[in-house]
């Protein structure tokens, strides 16, 4: 249940901004203003913000972003994400403008050279976890951050497909989907690999065998200790001889792939909860200007309903300006 009890603890939502923008860009490829400016990613981001605010009712929101320079994973492994094409100019321009959107909505931004947004999310979670009065939800467009889930305290709100089909994962939901807890997702990727990030995994080990091994034995370290001391236990678990051989040959790949897949929680950022709740930080004039500039007419009433600080007079002005385009 995502809706908050009025007497419940405070809620922090952490945005995986790039993941949301990428998903929106590909879901709305033809969105553009009358001037020809591409706007699909920005429309999707603001729609997601409205949805998050309405469904999750956060007290605080923080946003993380990727920077274009290489990260520690690229340095460790030059093939990391190397198969991905360079981002379209139309998407890059919207990523840059997304910073203005976040600023207008009073959402602090976190970005750091050498680290991915996921690492910054992991670090914020690590900083806030000891505070049991804070409920943390990570809003993302992919599944990578699910390894950070802890019981019901740290959850992931993710897009299943498009921009409307969402799901909120807690630890129990991850266990039901994968057959093992969130803390072992990096181990799973260490065995199976992750084609989307070009993480190699162990050659020949697929989803089924990786799931069996992780669900039965746990971490990669435990799997290889078992393989070394009691290889018969792997056979008892249903792992075939050929797979056991591939596993033995791929130990270094497994360990290295796990390292690549593990979200770091030690990025050198200073995170503290904002002094005031996010709605109190909204720059209503800037929000109006953004909605007008990109001609997001359908978002005006949704934002009006969401942000009590935006007066009906101002919203009417935005609508008039938008309709003049």
Image (cartoon, helix red, strand yellow):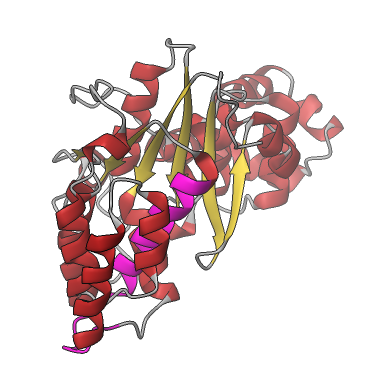
Query: Is residue 274 placed above or below 56 in the rendered structure?
Result: above
Residue 9: percent from the left, percent from the top? 50, 18
Visible residue check, residue 233: yes
Residue 74: percent from the left, percent from the top? 24, 47
Quarter-of-image position of residue 153: top right
Query: Is residue 219 placed above or below 34 in the rendered structure?
Result: above
Work out whether residue 84 or residue 133 is closer to the camera in this orientation and state it. 133
**Magenta stretch in the rendered image:** 32-54
Identify the image quadrant of the N terminus: top right
| Residue under the image location 19 percent in, 82 percent down | 37
Q: Is residue 85 left or right of residue 325?
A: right
Secondary structure mainly formed by the magenta segment: helix
Residue 182: percent from the left, percent from the top? 59, 31
- Per the image, is 127 magenta? no
Quarter-of-image position of residue 8: top right
Q: Is residue 245 left or right of residue 301?
A: right
Residue 218: percent from the left, percent from the top? 66, 25
Quarter-of-image position of residue 221: top right
């Amino acid at each position: 249940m995502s809706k908050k009890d009025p007497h419940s603890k405070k809620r922090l939502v952490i945005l995986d901004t790039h993941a949301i923008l990428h998903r929106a860009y590909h879901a709305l490829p033809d969105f553009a203003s009358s001037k020809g400016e591409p706007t699909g990613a920005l429309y999707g981001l603001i729609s997601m913000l409205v949805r998050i605010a309405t469904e999750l009712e956060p007290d605080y929101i923080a946003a993380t972003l990727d920077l274009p320079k290489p990260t520690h994973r690229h340095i460790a492994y030059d093939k990391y994400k190397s198969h991905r094409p360079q981002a379209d100019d139309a998407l890059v321009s919207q990523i840059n403008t997304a910073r203005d959107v976040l600023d207008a909505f009073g959402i602090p931004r976190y970005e750091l050279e050498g680290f991915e947004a996921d690492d910054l999310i992991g670090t914020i979670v690590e900083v806030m976890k000891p505070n049991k009065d804070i409920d943390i939800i990570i809003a993302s467009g992919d599944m990578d951050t699910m390894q950070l889930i802890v019981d019901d305290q740290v959850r992931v709100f993710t897009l299943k497909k498009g921009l409307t089909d969402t799901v909120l994962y807690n630890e129990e939901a991850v266990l039901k989907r994968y057959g093992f807890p969130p803390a072992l997702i990096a181990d799973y990727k260490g065995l199976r690999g992750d084609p989307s990030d070009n993480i190699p995994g162990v050659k020949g080990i697929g989803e089924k065998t990786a799931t069996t091994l992780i669900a039965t034995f746990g971490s990669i370290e435990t799997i290889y200790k078992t393989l070394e001391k009691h290889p018969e236990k792997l056979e008892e678990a249903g792992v075939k001889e050929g797979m056991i051989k591939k596993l033995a040959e791929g130990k270094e790949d497994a360990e290295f792939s796990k390292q690549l897949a593990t979200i770091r929680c030690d990025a050198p950022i200073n995170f503290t909860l904002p002094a005031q709740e996010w709605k109190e930080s909204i720059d209503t004039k800037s929000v109006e200007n953004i909605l007008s500039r990109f001609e997001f007419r359908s978002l005006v009433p949704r934002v009006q309903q969401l942000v009590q600080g935006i007066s009906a007079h101002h919203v009417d002005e935005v609508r008039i300006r938008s309709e003049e385009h």
